[in-house]
Amino acid sequence: MNQTLYMLKAIWNWKTSGILSKRTLKQVKFDWQRLKTRAKRHGTKPFIPSHDRLHLGSGRHLVNGWLNVDVCKSDYDIDFACGWLPWQNHVFKAIVSQHTIEHLELKTELLPLLCELRRVLKPEGELWLSCPDIEKVCRSYMEHRMVDLIAECRTRIPKFSLGKAPSSEMINHLFHQNGEHKNLFDFELLSWALKQSGFTQISRVTETDLLEKLPGFPSRADDLQSLYVVAGGV
Ligand SMILES: C[S@@+](CC[C@H](N)C(=O)[O-])C[C@H]1O[C@@H](n2cnc3c(N)ncnc32)[C@H](O)[C@@H]1O
């Protein structure tokens, strides 16, 4: 009984007990948002979207002329981990998702999402993905102790800082991002996931390729740390 009381008190006093870390609380808040979004979409019948280009995981970067989707505050809120997408087959001619797939569990969340993306993409359409690249990050760690990637990150986020920690702390930031990142990819692993989901043509590209093909997307300036892939085929 004493132990149960201790545990209940620790949870009740979560701010001072340190039992629910900042990371856990952030995750609980995010999962609560996912649940609210799932409830809002429950029972939705497949429909034709307002745009034929999909921006998946738009965050704060809403792109004109695209259907920007995210868990909240987007053109159409969805939980990507729920296993289905609300649109009819073959409705999008292009799909872009930058730095979002690493937020999903590989087998239970990402593979079902990729299968759904194949379904809603037109047969001749293209899926553009980017995420942190295991190979590039490891190479930077071995050859430059991450200093080059920190400099690149500062071009995007001028205030970015690791505090007083050595530059190798950057590897934790990229691989875990305070618990938000569930998986990382190299080209081999991402190609495997895409093939499992029905994509047959998969190529490694760069951010420049994406920006040239799809003007209007804001530059992330993150080629040093990111894997860029374009996938299609049926
Ligand atoms: C790192 S941000 C990337 C935002 C933007 N694409 C960019 O490049 O700046 C990842 C985005 O994925 C979204 N996200 C992660 N998991 C999600 C989920 N299960 N359902 C919907 N959105 C999710 C987050 O809300 C966030 O906006």
Image: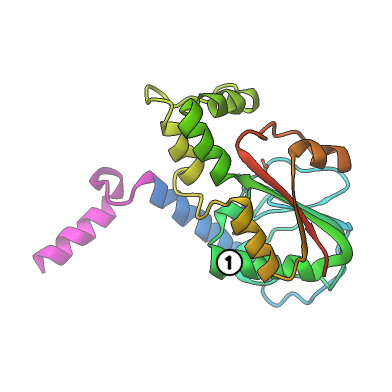
Does residue 49 appear to the left or right of 182 in the view shown?
Answer: right
Where is 214 relative to 195, above or below? Answer: above
Which region shows up in magenta?
1-22
Q: How is the image coloured?
A: rainbow
- Can residue 58 be seen by looking at this rendering? no
Residue 203, given in percent of the width and then of the height, sits at: 76, 52
- Can residue 123 be seen by looking at this rendering? yes
Q: Quadrant for residue 134, please give it.
A: top right
Does residue 95 appear to the left or right of 77 in the view shown?
Answer: right
Nearer the observer, 112 or 197: 197
Residue 112, given in percent of the width and then of the height, sits at: 64, 70
Split into 4 quadrants, where in the image is the C terminus? bottom right
Q: Secondary structure at mark 1?
A: helix
Where is 216 relative to 155, above or below? Answer: below
Query: What amino acid is labelled 1 in the image?
Result: Glu
Task: Mark 1 and ligand 1: say if the CB distance to the nearest ligand atom is below 8 Å.
Answer: yes
Determine which residue is flagged by label 1.
109
The verdict on residue 49 being magenta is no
Residue at image position (34%, 47%) is: 21
Residue at image position (84%, 72%) is: 47
Split into 4 quadrants, where in the image is the N terminus? bottom left
